[in-house]
Amino acid sequence: MRSDKLLANMGYGSRKEVKKLLKKGGLTVNGEKVTDGKTHVNPQEDEIEIFGETIDYKPFIYLMMNKPQGVISATEDRSEETVVDLLEIEDALYEPFPVGRLDKDTTGLLLLTNDGKLAHQLTSPKKKVEKTYRVHIDAPLQDGNKDALEQGVILDDGYETKPARLEYVNGERGTLVKLTITEGKFHQVKRMFQARGRNVIALKRESMGPLLLDPHLDPGTYRELTDEEIALLKNDS
């Protein structure tokens, strides 16, 4: 990889800014200063330092966030706070983006990455990746509604949802349920329950494919995925 591309990928500025950094002798590779942006380096084998600080280069970043209410699933917005705004600068440098969307008032598991290939596989309808939500509805479901939701319901725009899976939390029919779907239509979970005469009061995503929300993550916090979690996601998709 060219040294100027490495620095750009690491978030050290535009091509012009990277060129200035190189001229100042800010980059050393295996103890030798590199001032030519065309010089090739091997991030996996070479010891690379920026102004004396060793950098650990990685092409992709994978973050699990417990998305809080009131934050939108986007990389930028003129008026609203986004999930990317919650990232530390060293993670934001990789320019990760949310994989799929959670509504502004929906909480729970959100994956952010700059791995476009994996993101596409996880969100492609053909892959049928399961997503499980904990749903608080305004009243218990009536007889037959569980079967209807699992078989597929007609939404307000005429779309018929794919088969889903529903279970009652604590094993009894109440206002807390878990719904597993393989799609991601606009406000789909809310609209599915509305189709059966129920309104969603609170919605939290608990899993996406084999990835489970870390129970130790407070709303608004995040962590990097483990190697095992990354492998599970890639194998599942």
Image: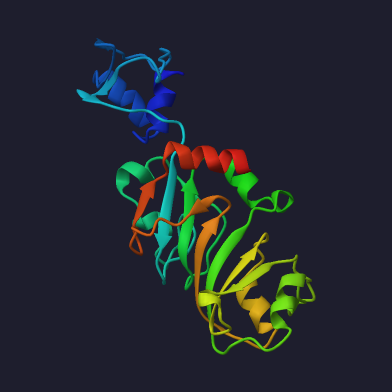
Q: In this rendering, does residue 180 appear at all?
A: yes
**For residue 53, side relative to residue 216 (left or right):** left
**For residue 220, side relative to residue 102 (left or right):** left
Question: 25 or 216: which is nearer to us?
Answer: 216
Please say which color scheme the image uses. Answer: rainbow
At 55% from the left edge and 50% from the top edge, which residue is drawn? 210
At 36% from the left edge and 64% from the top edge, which residue is drawn? 219
Q: In this view, does 38 lie above or below 114?
A: above
Residue 229 in percent (x, y) is at 48, 42
**For residue 160, side relative to residue 65 (left or right):** right
Residue 39 in percent (x, y) is at 40, 12
Marker count (numbered):
0
Q: Is residue 2 above or below residue 122?
A: above
Residue 46 in percent (x, y) is at 35, 14
Toward the left, the furthest residue is: 52
Question: 191 or 13: which is nearer to us?
Answer: 191
At 35% from the left edge and 58% from the top edge, which residue is drawn? 217
Q: In this rendering, does residue 116 appear at all?
A: no
Residue 35 in percent (x, y) is at 31, 14
Say which quarter of the image contains residue 71: bottom left
| Quarter occupied by the C terminus | top right
Say which quarter of the image contains residue 154: bottom right
Q: Is residue 114 above or below residue 173?
A: above
At 55% from the left edge and 85% from the top edge, which residue is drawn? 174
Question: 83 or 233: which is nearer to us?
Answer: 233
Q: Is residue 180 above or below residue 29?
A: below
Question: 178 or 219: which is nearer to us?
Answer: 178
